[in-house]
Image (cartoon, rainbow, N blue to C red):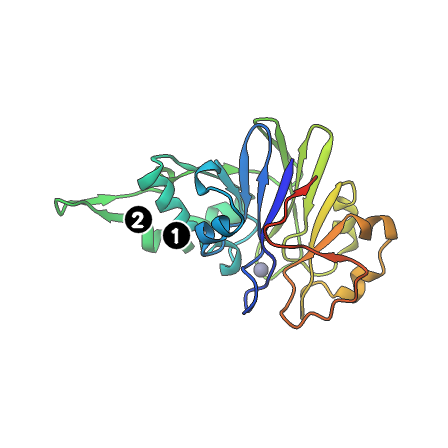
Amino acid sequence: MICVPLGVGDAFSERHYSTSFAVLSDGVDLLIDCPHPMRRMLHAADLSARRFAGVILTHLHGDHVSGLESFAFFNYFVLKQRLKIIACPAVLDALWPRHLAVSMERLRRADGAWVQMRFEDYFEPIALQPGARYALNGLEIELRETIHHIPTTAVKIYEQGRCLGYSADTTFDLSLIEWLSEANLIFHETNYGTHTAYQSLKGLDASLRARMRLVHYPDDFAHEGEILTAKAGQRDVV
Ligand SMILES: [Zn+2]
């Protein structure tokens, strides 16, 4: 399994695309989160947008989901396929009625006729309860709730005895870090306010810090080197 960070910045960044990932495996390729401009971000990472079967969606803040409309339209009109959306029920249930429907629920055909569209016309929704595992073409995916403004889940993905972990947006939470700690490679957020302070992560065990890469950091992040920052476009072998 290979994980390619597509962006490493936060919602306000002038320097980086928003934090998101491409996960490449033998059986299936997925995105973790889908900020705008996803196709541009994939191109910058030398990846084709055509290869992705779906998106694991951590939560509905714009810097994680703002590219989903365009990416789904691309899949619908160009690739003629539905995009799998893997998310916890709280995220999945709100995605269409409270986020996407306003711009996607009606299409106008070339002959002027209106077509009423449903969530399932564009997407194959997969509701994954936190703690349960979903198997997909050799991958197993597990979610866990984090502490954030709105419903949000961290992610672990398993393949052939290896494990990738991503904290998603969260307050510093030792129980979450314990949950992530089995992963061979862990992407963890750091930022201001209710996010995870870098000072807290610096105090973690050295073996854990060695497997950790920082994402979602602010442009003025005063990085001191104890934990490596993730690099957009870099292929990290899990
Ligand atoms: Zn957020």
| Residue at 81% from the left image edge and 53% from the top image edge | 209
Give, as a three-letter code, the residue at label 2: Glu
Determine if the C-beta at disc 1 is less than 8 A from ligand 1.
no
Determine if the C-beta at disc 2 is less than 8 A from ligand 1.
no
Task: Pick the quarter of the image with the N terminus.
Answer: top right
Residue 100, numbered label: 1
Outermost residue toward the left? 111
Q: Are marks 1 and 2 in contact (CB under 8 Å)?
A: yes
Left or right? Give the position of 146 relative to 34: right
- What is the secondary structure assignment of the residue under circle 1? helix
Residue 105, numbered label: 2
| Residue at 60% from the left image edge and 33% from the top image edge | 25
Q: Where 155 sits versus 201, above or below?
A: above
Q: Quadrant of ligand 1?
A: bottom right
Task: Pick the quarter of the image with the C terminus.
Answer: top right
Give, as a three-letter code, the residue at label 1: Leu
Q: Based on the displayed image, in which of its 4 quarters is residue 192 positioned?
A: bottom right
| Residue at 59% from the left image edge and 50% from the top image edge | 233
The location of residue 50, given as percent across then percent down, is 43, 38
Left or right? Give the position of 222 relative to 102: right
